[in-house]
Image (tube, rainbow, N blue to C red):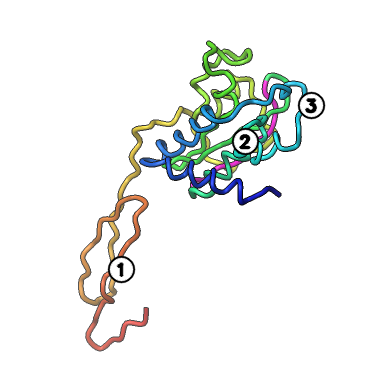
Amino acid sequence: GYDNAKVQPVIDGIIAGATGSTYAKVLSVFNWFETNVTYHPDGMTGATPHDAHELYGALVTKVAVCEGYSKAFKEILDQMKIPCMLLSGEMDNGPHMWNAVQMDDGKWYFTDVTNHQLLKGTATDLGGGRAYTNYYVQDTSGMIVDGDYTPGFNFSSRSLSATDYDPNFTPADFTVTFETNGGNTIASVPVANGDSLTLPPNPTRTGYTFDG
């Protein structure tokens, strides 16, 4: 467990600063780690304290390794109701943890908070040749091939994107129609993606009582 009294105010502040589209919100959280968290100096050797592997390390002491970064990132997105998973496997022949985020198009994208923060200012990653800027909502196949990621999981049941996420993607709106089975006509209602539908009055039909 962790000290929620110390963790939750940090999360609340991060969420309060994340506004706009889903892309903008996730990017705001992503960038918070770059600005506020330091990779533990012994992270490459494994001689790290327990907190560095937990969300407490990333959010409170602000010193963590990939596991702490990824757990904290997921906890924040969970509280924002944005689907996010922890992924573990290998990168460049060493153990690694990162995330996958489901965006508004319904597809999942790899997101690696650790490597973006750790490698900022360098031309490429640790040998895969992928620029540090390419660790945010990326196509999964590209990160596996170019970044030498070897996931220790089976994603076959997930909808994986073959391309990087389009930040200009706009979810489709809907038009809801009503079948009253011979009752009065109820006009269709346009509903924006993510909004709730306000139900119209119950239909009426002579000789019948609406039963819900």
Instruction: Determine which of the numbered discs, if any, sits on residue 47 in the image.
Output: 3
- Between the residue at mark 1 and the residue at mark 2, the CA separation in whole angstroms equals 44 Å
Decide whether residue 22 is among the magenta residues: no
Instruction: Determine which of the numbered discs, if any, sits on residue 199 in the image.
Output: 1
Crowding near the residue tagged with mark 1, few <14, some 14–19, many ≥20 C-alpha atoms within 10 Å: few
Residues 208 and 4: in front is 4
Asked if the residue under mark 2 is in contact with the one under mark 1, i.e. CB atoms within 8 Å, the reply is no
Q: Is residue 198 left or right of residue 56?
A: left
Looking at this view, name the residue that lies furthest to the top.
123
What is the magenta range? 82-91
Residue shown at 26% from the left, 76% from the top: 203
Label 2: element kind: helix
Residue 88, position as x, y percentages in the image: 68, 34
Residue shown at 68% from the left, 37% from the top: 153
Residue type indicated by callout 1:
Leu
Figure quadrant of the C terminus: bottom left
Residue 112, position as x, y percentages in the image: 57, 29
Residue type indicated by callout 3:
Ala
Residues 76 and 151: in front is 76
Residues 90 and 22: in front is 22
Tell me which numbered mark, 1 or 2, is placed earlier along the sequence.
Answer: 2
